[in-house]
Image (tube, rainbow, N blue to C red):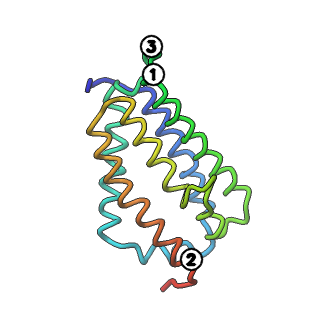
Amino acid sequence: MHFGFSYVGLIYLIMLMTPNLIWTKNQPKDYEKYAKNENKILLAFERVGEVLVTCVAVIFKDFNLRPWTNWSWWLVLSFSIMIMYEIFWIRYFMSEKTMADFYKSLLGVPVAGATLPVIAFLLLAVYGGNIILLVSVIILGIGHIGIHMMHRKEARSGVSK
């Protein structure tokens, strides 16, 4: 692991945060009803993971491009998944913006809006050989995917308080 600025990490964070900022003005109908029921432990994992991933992604230069090797396929796969994440958002923003639209799978990936970026950053950690990002992404994934799986389950059953 090597400290230094990661422009690849910054690109990933921009790809992650831009649609999320747009989403704040385009949330699914009744989303607040589901958000207030979030498990506090999962929420803590999510928040800690968000901070860790955001920081680690840009402070290690291990994620930047380097001469091509077979190891580079990890970055190609990771970036492809980030592209899928952008496609998820385009599809959502073009929809009626319901909870069903928000929790639709994409190419068989459940709760794609939560799952795809976690997988992409996990693969970025593998590419960079960075255990700190790997652990950070696992923490994030437990909280973020867990929360959204619960929301999807509540939305499907029509249960919200």
Q: Residue at x 34, y 57 (%)?
A: 47
Measure how far apart labels 2 and 1 are at the Cα level. Answer: 42 Å
Q: Residue at x 40, y 42 (%)?
A: 122
Q: Residue at x 56, y 77 (%)?
A: 155
Give the residue furthest to the front: 70
Three-letter code for the amino acid on which mark 1 is drawn: Asn
Chain-order first, disc 2 or disc 1: 1
Give the residue furthest to the top: 67
Figure check: 125 above or below 51: above
Q: Write down the residue under mark 2.
A: 155
Q: Residues within 10 Å of mark 3 (few under 14, many from 20)?
A: few
Pick the front one: 153 or 33: 153
Three-letter code for the amino acid on which mark 3 is drawn: Pro
Measure how far apart labels 3 and 2 are at the Cα level. Answer: 46 Å
Q: Secondary structure at mark 3?
A: loop
Residue 5 as seen in the image, left or right of residue 69: left
Q: Secondary structure at mark 1?
A: loop
Q: Write down the residue under mark 1.
A: 70
- Which image quadrant for residue 113? bottom right
Measure how far apart labels 3 and 1 are at the Cα level. Answer: 10 Å
Q: Secondary structure at mark 2?
A: helix
Q: Which mark is residue 67?
A: 3
- Which image quadrant for residue 80? top right
Pick the front one: 158 or 48: 158
Three-letter code for the amino acid on which mark 2 is drawn: Ala
Chain-order first, disc 3 or disc 2: 3
Label 2 near label 3: C-beta < 8 Å?
A: no
Q: Residues within 10 Å of mark 2 (few under 14, many from 20)?
A: some
Residue 140: x and y, percent? 36, 53
Q: Quadrant of the N terminus?
A: top left
Label 1 near label 3: C-beta < 8 Å?
A: no
